[in-house]
Structure formats: C-alpha cells, structure tokens
Image (cartoon, rainbow, N blue to C red):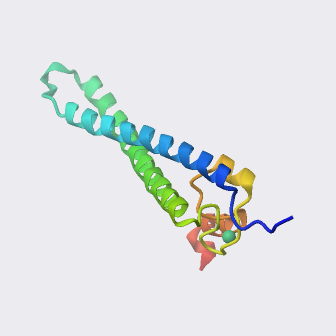
Amino acid sequence: MTPTTAPSPDLTRQLAGQLRQRREELQALLHAAAGASIATKAPPDVQDFKDVAAEDTRAQVDEVAQAHAAEEVDRIAAALRRVELGTYGLCQDCGEPIDERRLRALPATPYCTACQAIHERPPLQRR
Ligand SMILES: [Zn+2]
C-alpha cells in the first residue's frame, strides 16, 4: 500500500467536475436573484400593503440565500484552485489528506474532519 497523499487523479477529476457544475448552478442563481431584486423596485402603486410586506420578507430570505450562495461560490473557486495546484484533497490546516468519503460528501471542503471541528467551534470557546 502506498501512503495516501491526495485523492486519486480520477477522484479529483470527478469531484472537480461536480464543483464546476455546482458553481455554474450557483452563479445562475445569483444572476437570477440580481435580476429579481431590480424587478422588485418597480412602482408599488399596483400592489396592496399585504403584497409589499410579503415581498419584503421574501427579499430578506433571498439576501441570506444569496450570501450563502456567494460564500459557496468562493469555497468552490478555492477548491478548484487547489485542484490546479495539485493540493486538492489535502487539509488546508494540517496538510493531512482529507478522508475520501468526506470529500465525496463535501467536495469543496478545505479541512479534514478534525480541523473542521476546530473551525466550527463558537468564537467564545476558541479564545
Ligand atoms: Zn486538518
């Protein structure tokens, strides 16, 4: 058995393909959302107040969804950069190879399970 340093080229290619596809979906979503927020600035005189309130709530939800989508696009871009650099699948903190099952589930993850746990700890406990 050769020691694992990174996922196999086949797996890397497969996951990179998934990441590119996911990024395209997210970018389409972000573009659609950008178009929609322009559309909601149409004159409100054709709507009653109830509709306006519903629109506001939806706009806020969309903003959160958009922020998440934008973050994911960043994570995916960083992961694809690591594919090009040949460091994809290695933890960005400890440099250890990330478990293959974890990579398949979360292809854009920059950390192994142990380091992810540290990053997810609330800031109060980290100090
Ligand atoms: Zn790690």
**Which quadrant, please, contains the C terminus?**
bottom right
Q: Which residue is located at x 64 percent, y 66 percent?
A: 90
Q: Position of residue 46 (x, y in %)?
A: 15, 19
Give whichever of 10, 124 is nearer the camera.
Answer: 10
Ligand 1's quadrant: bottom right
Q: Position of residue 94 (x, y in %)?
A: 66, 75
Give whichever of 113, 63 is nearer the camera.
Answer: 113
Q: Is residue 44 above or below residue 6?
A: above
Q: Which residue is located at x 35 percent, y 41 percent?
A: 30
Q: Is residue 56 above or below residue 88?
A: above
Quarter-wise, where is residue 45 in the image?
top left
Q: Residue furthest right?
A: 1
Relative side of 113 to 120, left or right: right
Q: Which residue is located at x 52 percent, y 66 percent?
A: 85
Q: Is residue 58 above or below residue 96?
A: above
Q: Position of residue 4 (x, y in %)?
A: 76, 65
